[in-house]
Amino acid sequence: MLTAISRYGARVHPATQQIVAACRERGEFIQGPQIAAFEQAFAARLGAHHAITASYGRIAFYFILKALQIPAGSEIILPALTFWGVPELARVAGLTVRFADVDPATFCMDPAALERTITEKTRAVVPTHLYGLPCDMDAILDIAGRHNLAVVEDCAHALGATYRGRPVGTFGDGALFSFQTLKPLNCYGGGMAVVREATVAERVRQQVEALPWPDEKRIANKLLVGRLQRIFTRPRVFTFTGFPILWVSSYTGSQPDVYLWEKIRSLNPLPEDYLERCSNVQATLGLAGLDLLDGWTAATRSHAHAMNAALGDLPGVQVPSEQPERTHVYYQYCLSGPDRDGLVRDCIRRGVDTETLHVDVCTRLDLFGGERSEAPGADRAAQAIQVPVYASLTDQQSRRVVRVVREAIARRLPAAATPPSQGVSV
């Protein structure tokens, strides 16, 4: 019988339930010393001076912007291809959002597009290490330095990635990290602000410490939802739950994916759960997860490299860019090929779930004024598909994903253009 493979796979510490139970038994489910310990360990791992937990990575970004004391109405530049919530929170912080196009080969901000977007009102730039590949930080920092711009790195996808041997999140004035269930470090929610200067870090901490502690029921619900997500993406469970829906939709043309993502909307006023602190149990899970992070990343990279080897010789196929001196952690493995929608249909009908767009082309969103600016690179990059390479795949499952994807692409190429298959049998 066919066993289906989900597009998602959470990284889960094997002792998660014991860690949660121990926090409850100690009376440290919401408040406790592991918050400070997690902050210190996280900062030490990056070689950074200051790390402050928050309830979301996106609100950590908001706190950094407020702490940098950028004048209201100033312009901030973000990549045109990014999660909508980050530029929206820049707007809530009182800034005017502008978008720079991305390089469709790397999915990261194009430095030349950044320079073209700068005006006399620009005060900050947000290089987003999208899908786990670092931006060209030398070029971006050079531009930022010449124009006196603050730099806030979006590292939500990129914990563990490096640029010239240095961890992302340590190049700018600040950086945000996310610990949502599917992120490189899973704390079932939460985030981290990493800040260079002590005075800015203190302003971030003052904002966080002025917030109330979360309700225990809310955190327990986050843990439950995360556990259910983990269970329902396991191949044996996914085969009998989500997969049949996706299989049927491949024939009917319906798009059940739209129910998976957060509704695009104004975040002013800020949602209630943004304005609370990170819980101790989440910090404890993060602290334990840091010890396993490198192993998870190595497994993901191994699956990605197998995919590169199997697909890189196919004409018309663009596999993820392995840039010199940049370590890609493959939060998402994105490739471009012929007939994107047909590839997605073929893969799901053979039991491999893929995704068409994990983030947003913000220049196309009504929230930011619709089509008021052109971003052809982002539009092209949005035609990529995301293929599962996550750490919890077994080697056998990874080989099957490789075979299914390669064969789906090969069917769309002239027979003479398809090289012999190598190393992709199951």
Image: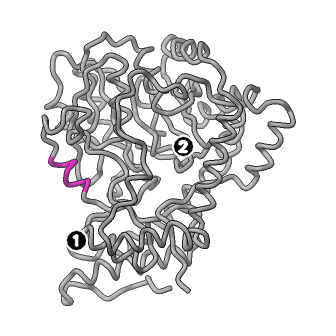
**What residue sits 65% from the left and 34% below the top?**
218
Question: 42 or 1: nearer the eye?
Answer: 1
**What residue sits 35% from the left and 78% below the top?**
406
Image position of 425 with respect to 209: above or below: below
Image position of 168 with respect to 402: above or below: above
Question: Which residue has dot 1 on it?
Answer: 339
Q: Give x and y (percent) for residue 217.
A: 69, 34
**What residue sits 35% from the left and 34% below the top?**
265
Q: Which mark is residue 180?
A: 2
Q: Secondary structure at mark 2?
A: loop
Q: Which mark is residue 8?
A: none
Q: Say whether residue 362 is magenta.
A: no
Looking at the rendered structure, the kind of residue marked 2 is Gln
Question: Magenta span covers which residues?
Answer: 376-382
Instruction: Tell me the quarter of the picture where residue 347 sits.
Output: bottom left
| Circle 2 residues within 10 Å: few <14, some 14–19, many ≥20 | many
Instruction: Tell me the quarter of the picture where residue 282 sits.
Output: top right
- Label 2, label 1: how far apart the Cα atoms are: 32 Å
Image position of 151 with respect to 402: above or below: above
